[in-house]
Image (tube, rainbow, N blue to C red):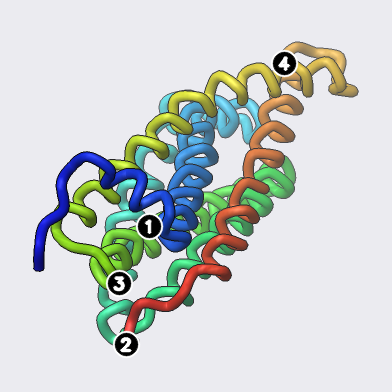
Amino acid sequence: MEQIQEKGVYRYLWRKQEIRLLCIIFMMDFFCYSYMVVILPTYLAKAAGMAASAAGLLAAAAFPAIGILRSMAGGILMSATGKRKPILAAGQALKLAGVLVLTLFLEQSLPAGIAGIIIFAVGNGMWMPVMYTMPMEMDGMDDNRVGAAFAFMSSCGFLMGFISPILGGGLTNIMMGMAPGQTTVLCHVFGLKWSLFLFGFTNIAALLCALRIEETGK
């Protein structure tokens, strides 16, 4: 296949709806994930009364360990079914469910909060093999275009990962001002809880994009 010139490759990619949709999914993923990773140890420690070291260990272990397993499982499932879109959509739905379970139940039950973290981590890992596979299967894509697509999606995702903690911190401060609690700790927990809750809804945008994208599997 004839290779295209580097000039104009990103313009070509932006005109492809499926690439735009994947890019938005990746951006929403990084937006929510980056904020959760930043605040999770503090949120666990203050909302569930965990020791700071235990909260940090749980947060550090949950995403890498479960994410590794679910990424592998996502790749196996993708190969076994030959489908991409259902796995992509399921990952976004699970991330939304995980955030909701974590934020709504952690203060009442630590096991329920941990379950929410696990659900999020499962969803966050299982769709990644699909994201890297779909551009290779799209019409009109060659080696240069696929490589540029990965670079484009990654750059947009990393940008959102940079922005999200900044916006999240500002949102937390706003929510703290609405907190009914009288102590600084309770106000901080309230702010972290509801800022993360709102961030979780970015996964709805990702889910809608996943439902719109065309299946590339066989």
Separation of residues labelled 4 and 3 (CA atoms): 46 Å
In the picture provided, is 124 more to the left or to the right than 10?
right
Separation of residues labelled 2 and 4 (CA atoms): 48 Å
Percent from the top left, x then y, of residue 117?
52, 50
Separation of residues labelled 2 and 1 (CA atoms): 22 Å
Percent from the top left, x then y, of residue 201?
67, 48
Which callout, 4 or 3, points to the residue nearer the camera? 3
Which callout, 2 or 3, points to the residue nearer the camera? 3
Question: In which quadrant of the rendered view does residue 135 lie?
Answer: bottom left
- Mark 1 secondary-structure assignment: helix
- Residue beneath disc 4: 173
What is the three-letter code of the residue carrying label 3?
A: Asp
Rendered image: mark on residue 125: 1
Query: Mark 2 or mark 3, which has the lower sequence index?
Result: 3
What is the three-letter code of the residue carrying label 2?
A: Lys
Separation of residues labelled 1 and 3 (CA atoms): 26 Å
- Mark 4 secondary-structure assignment: helix
Residue 55, visible in the rendered structure: no
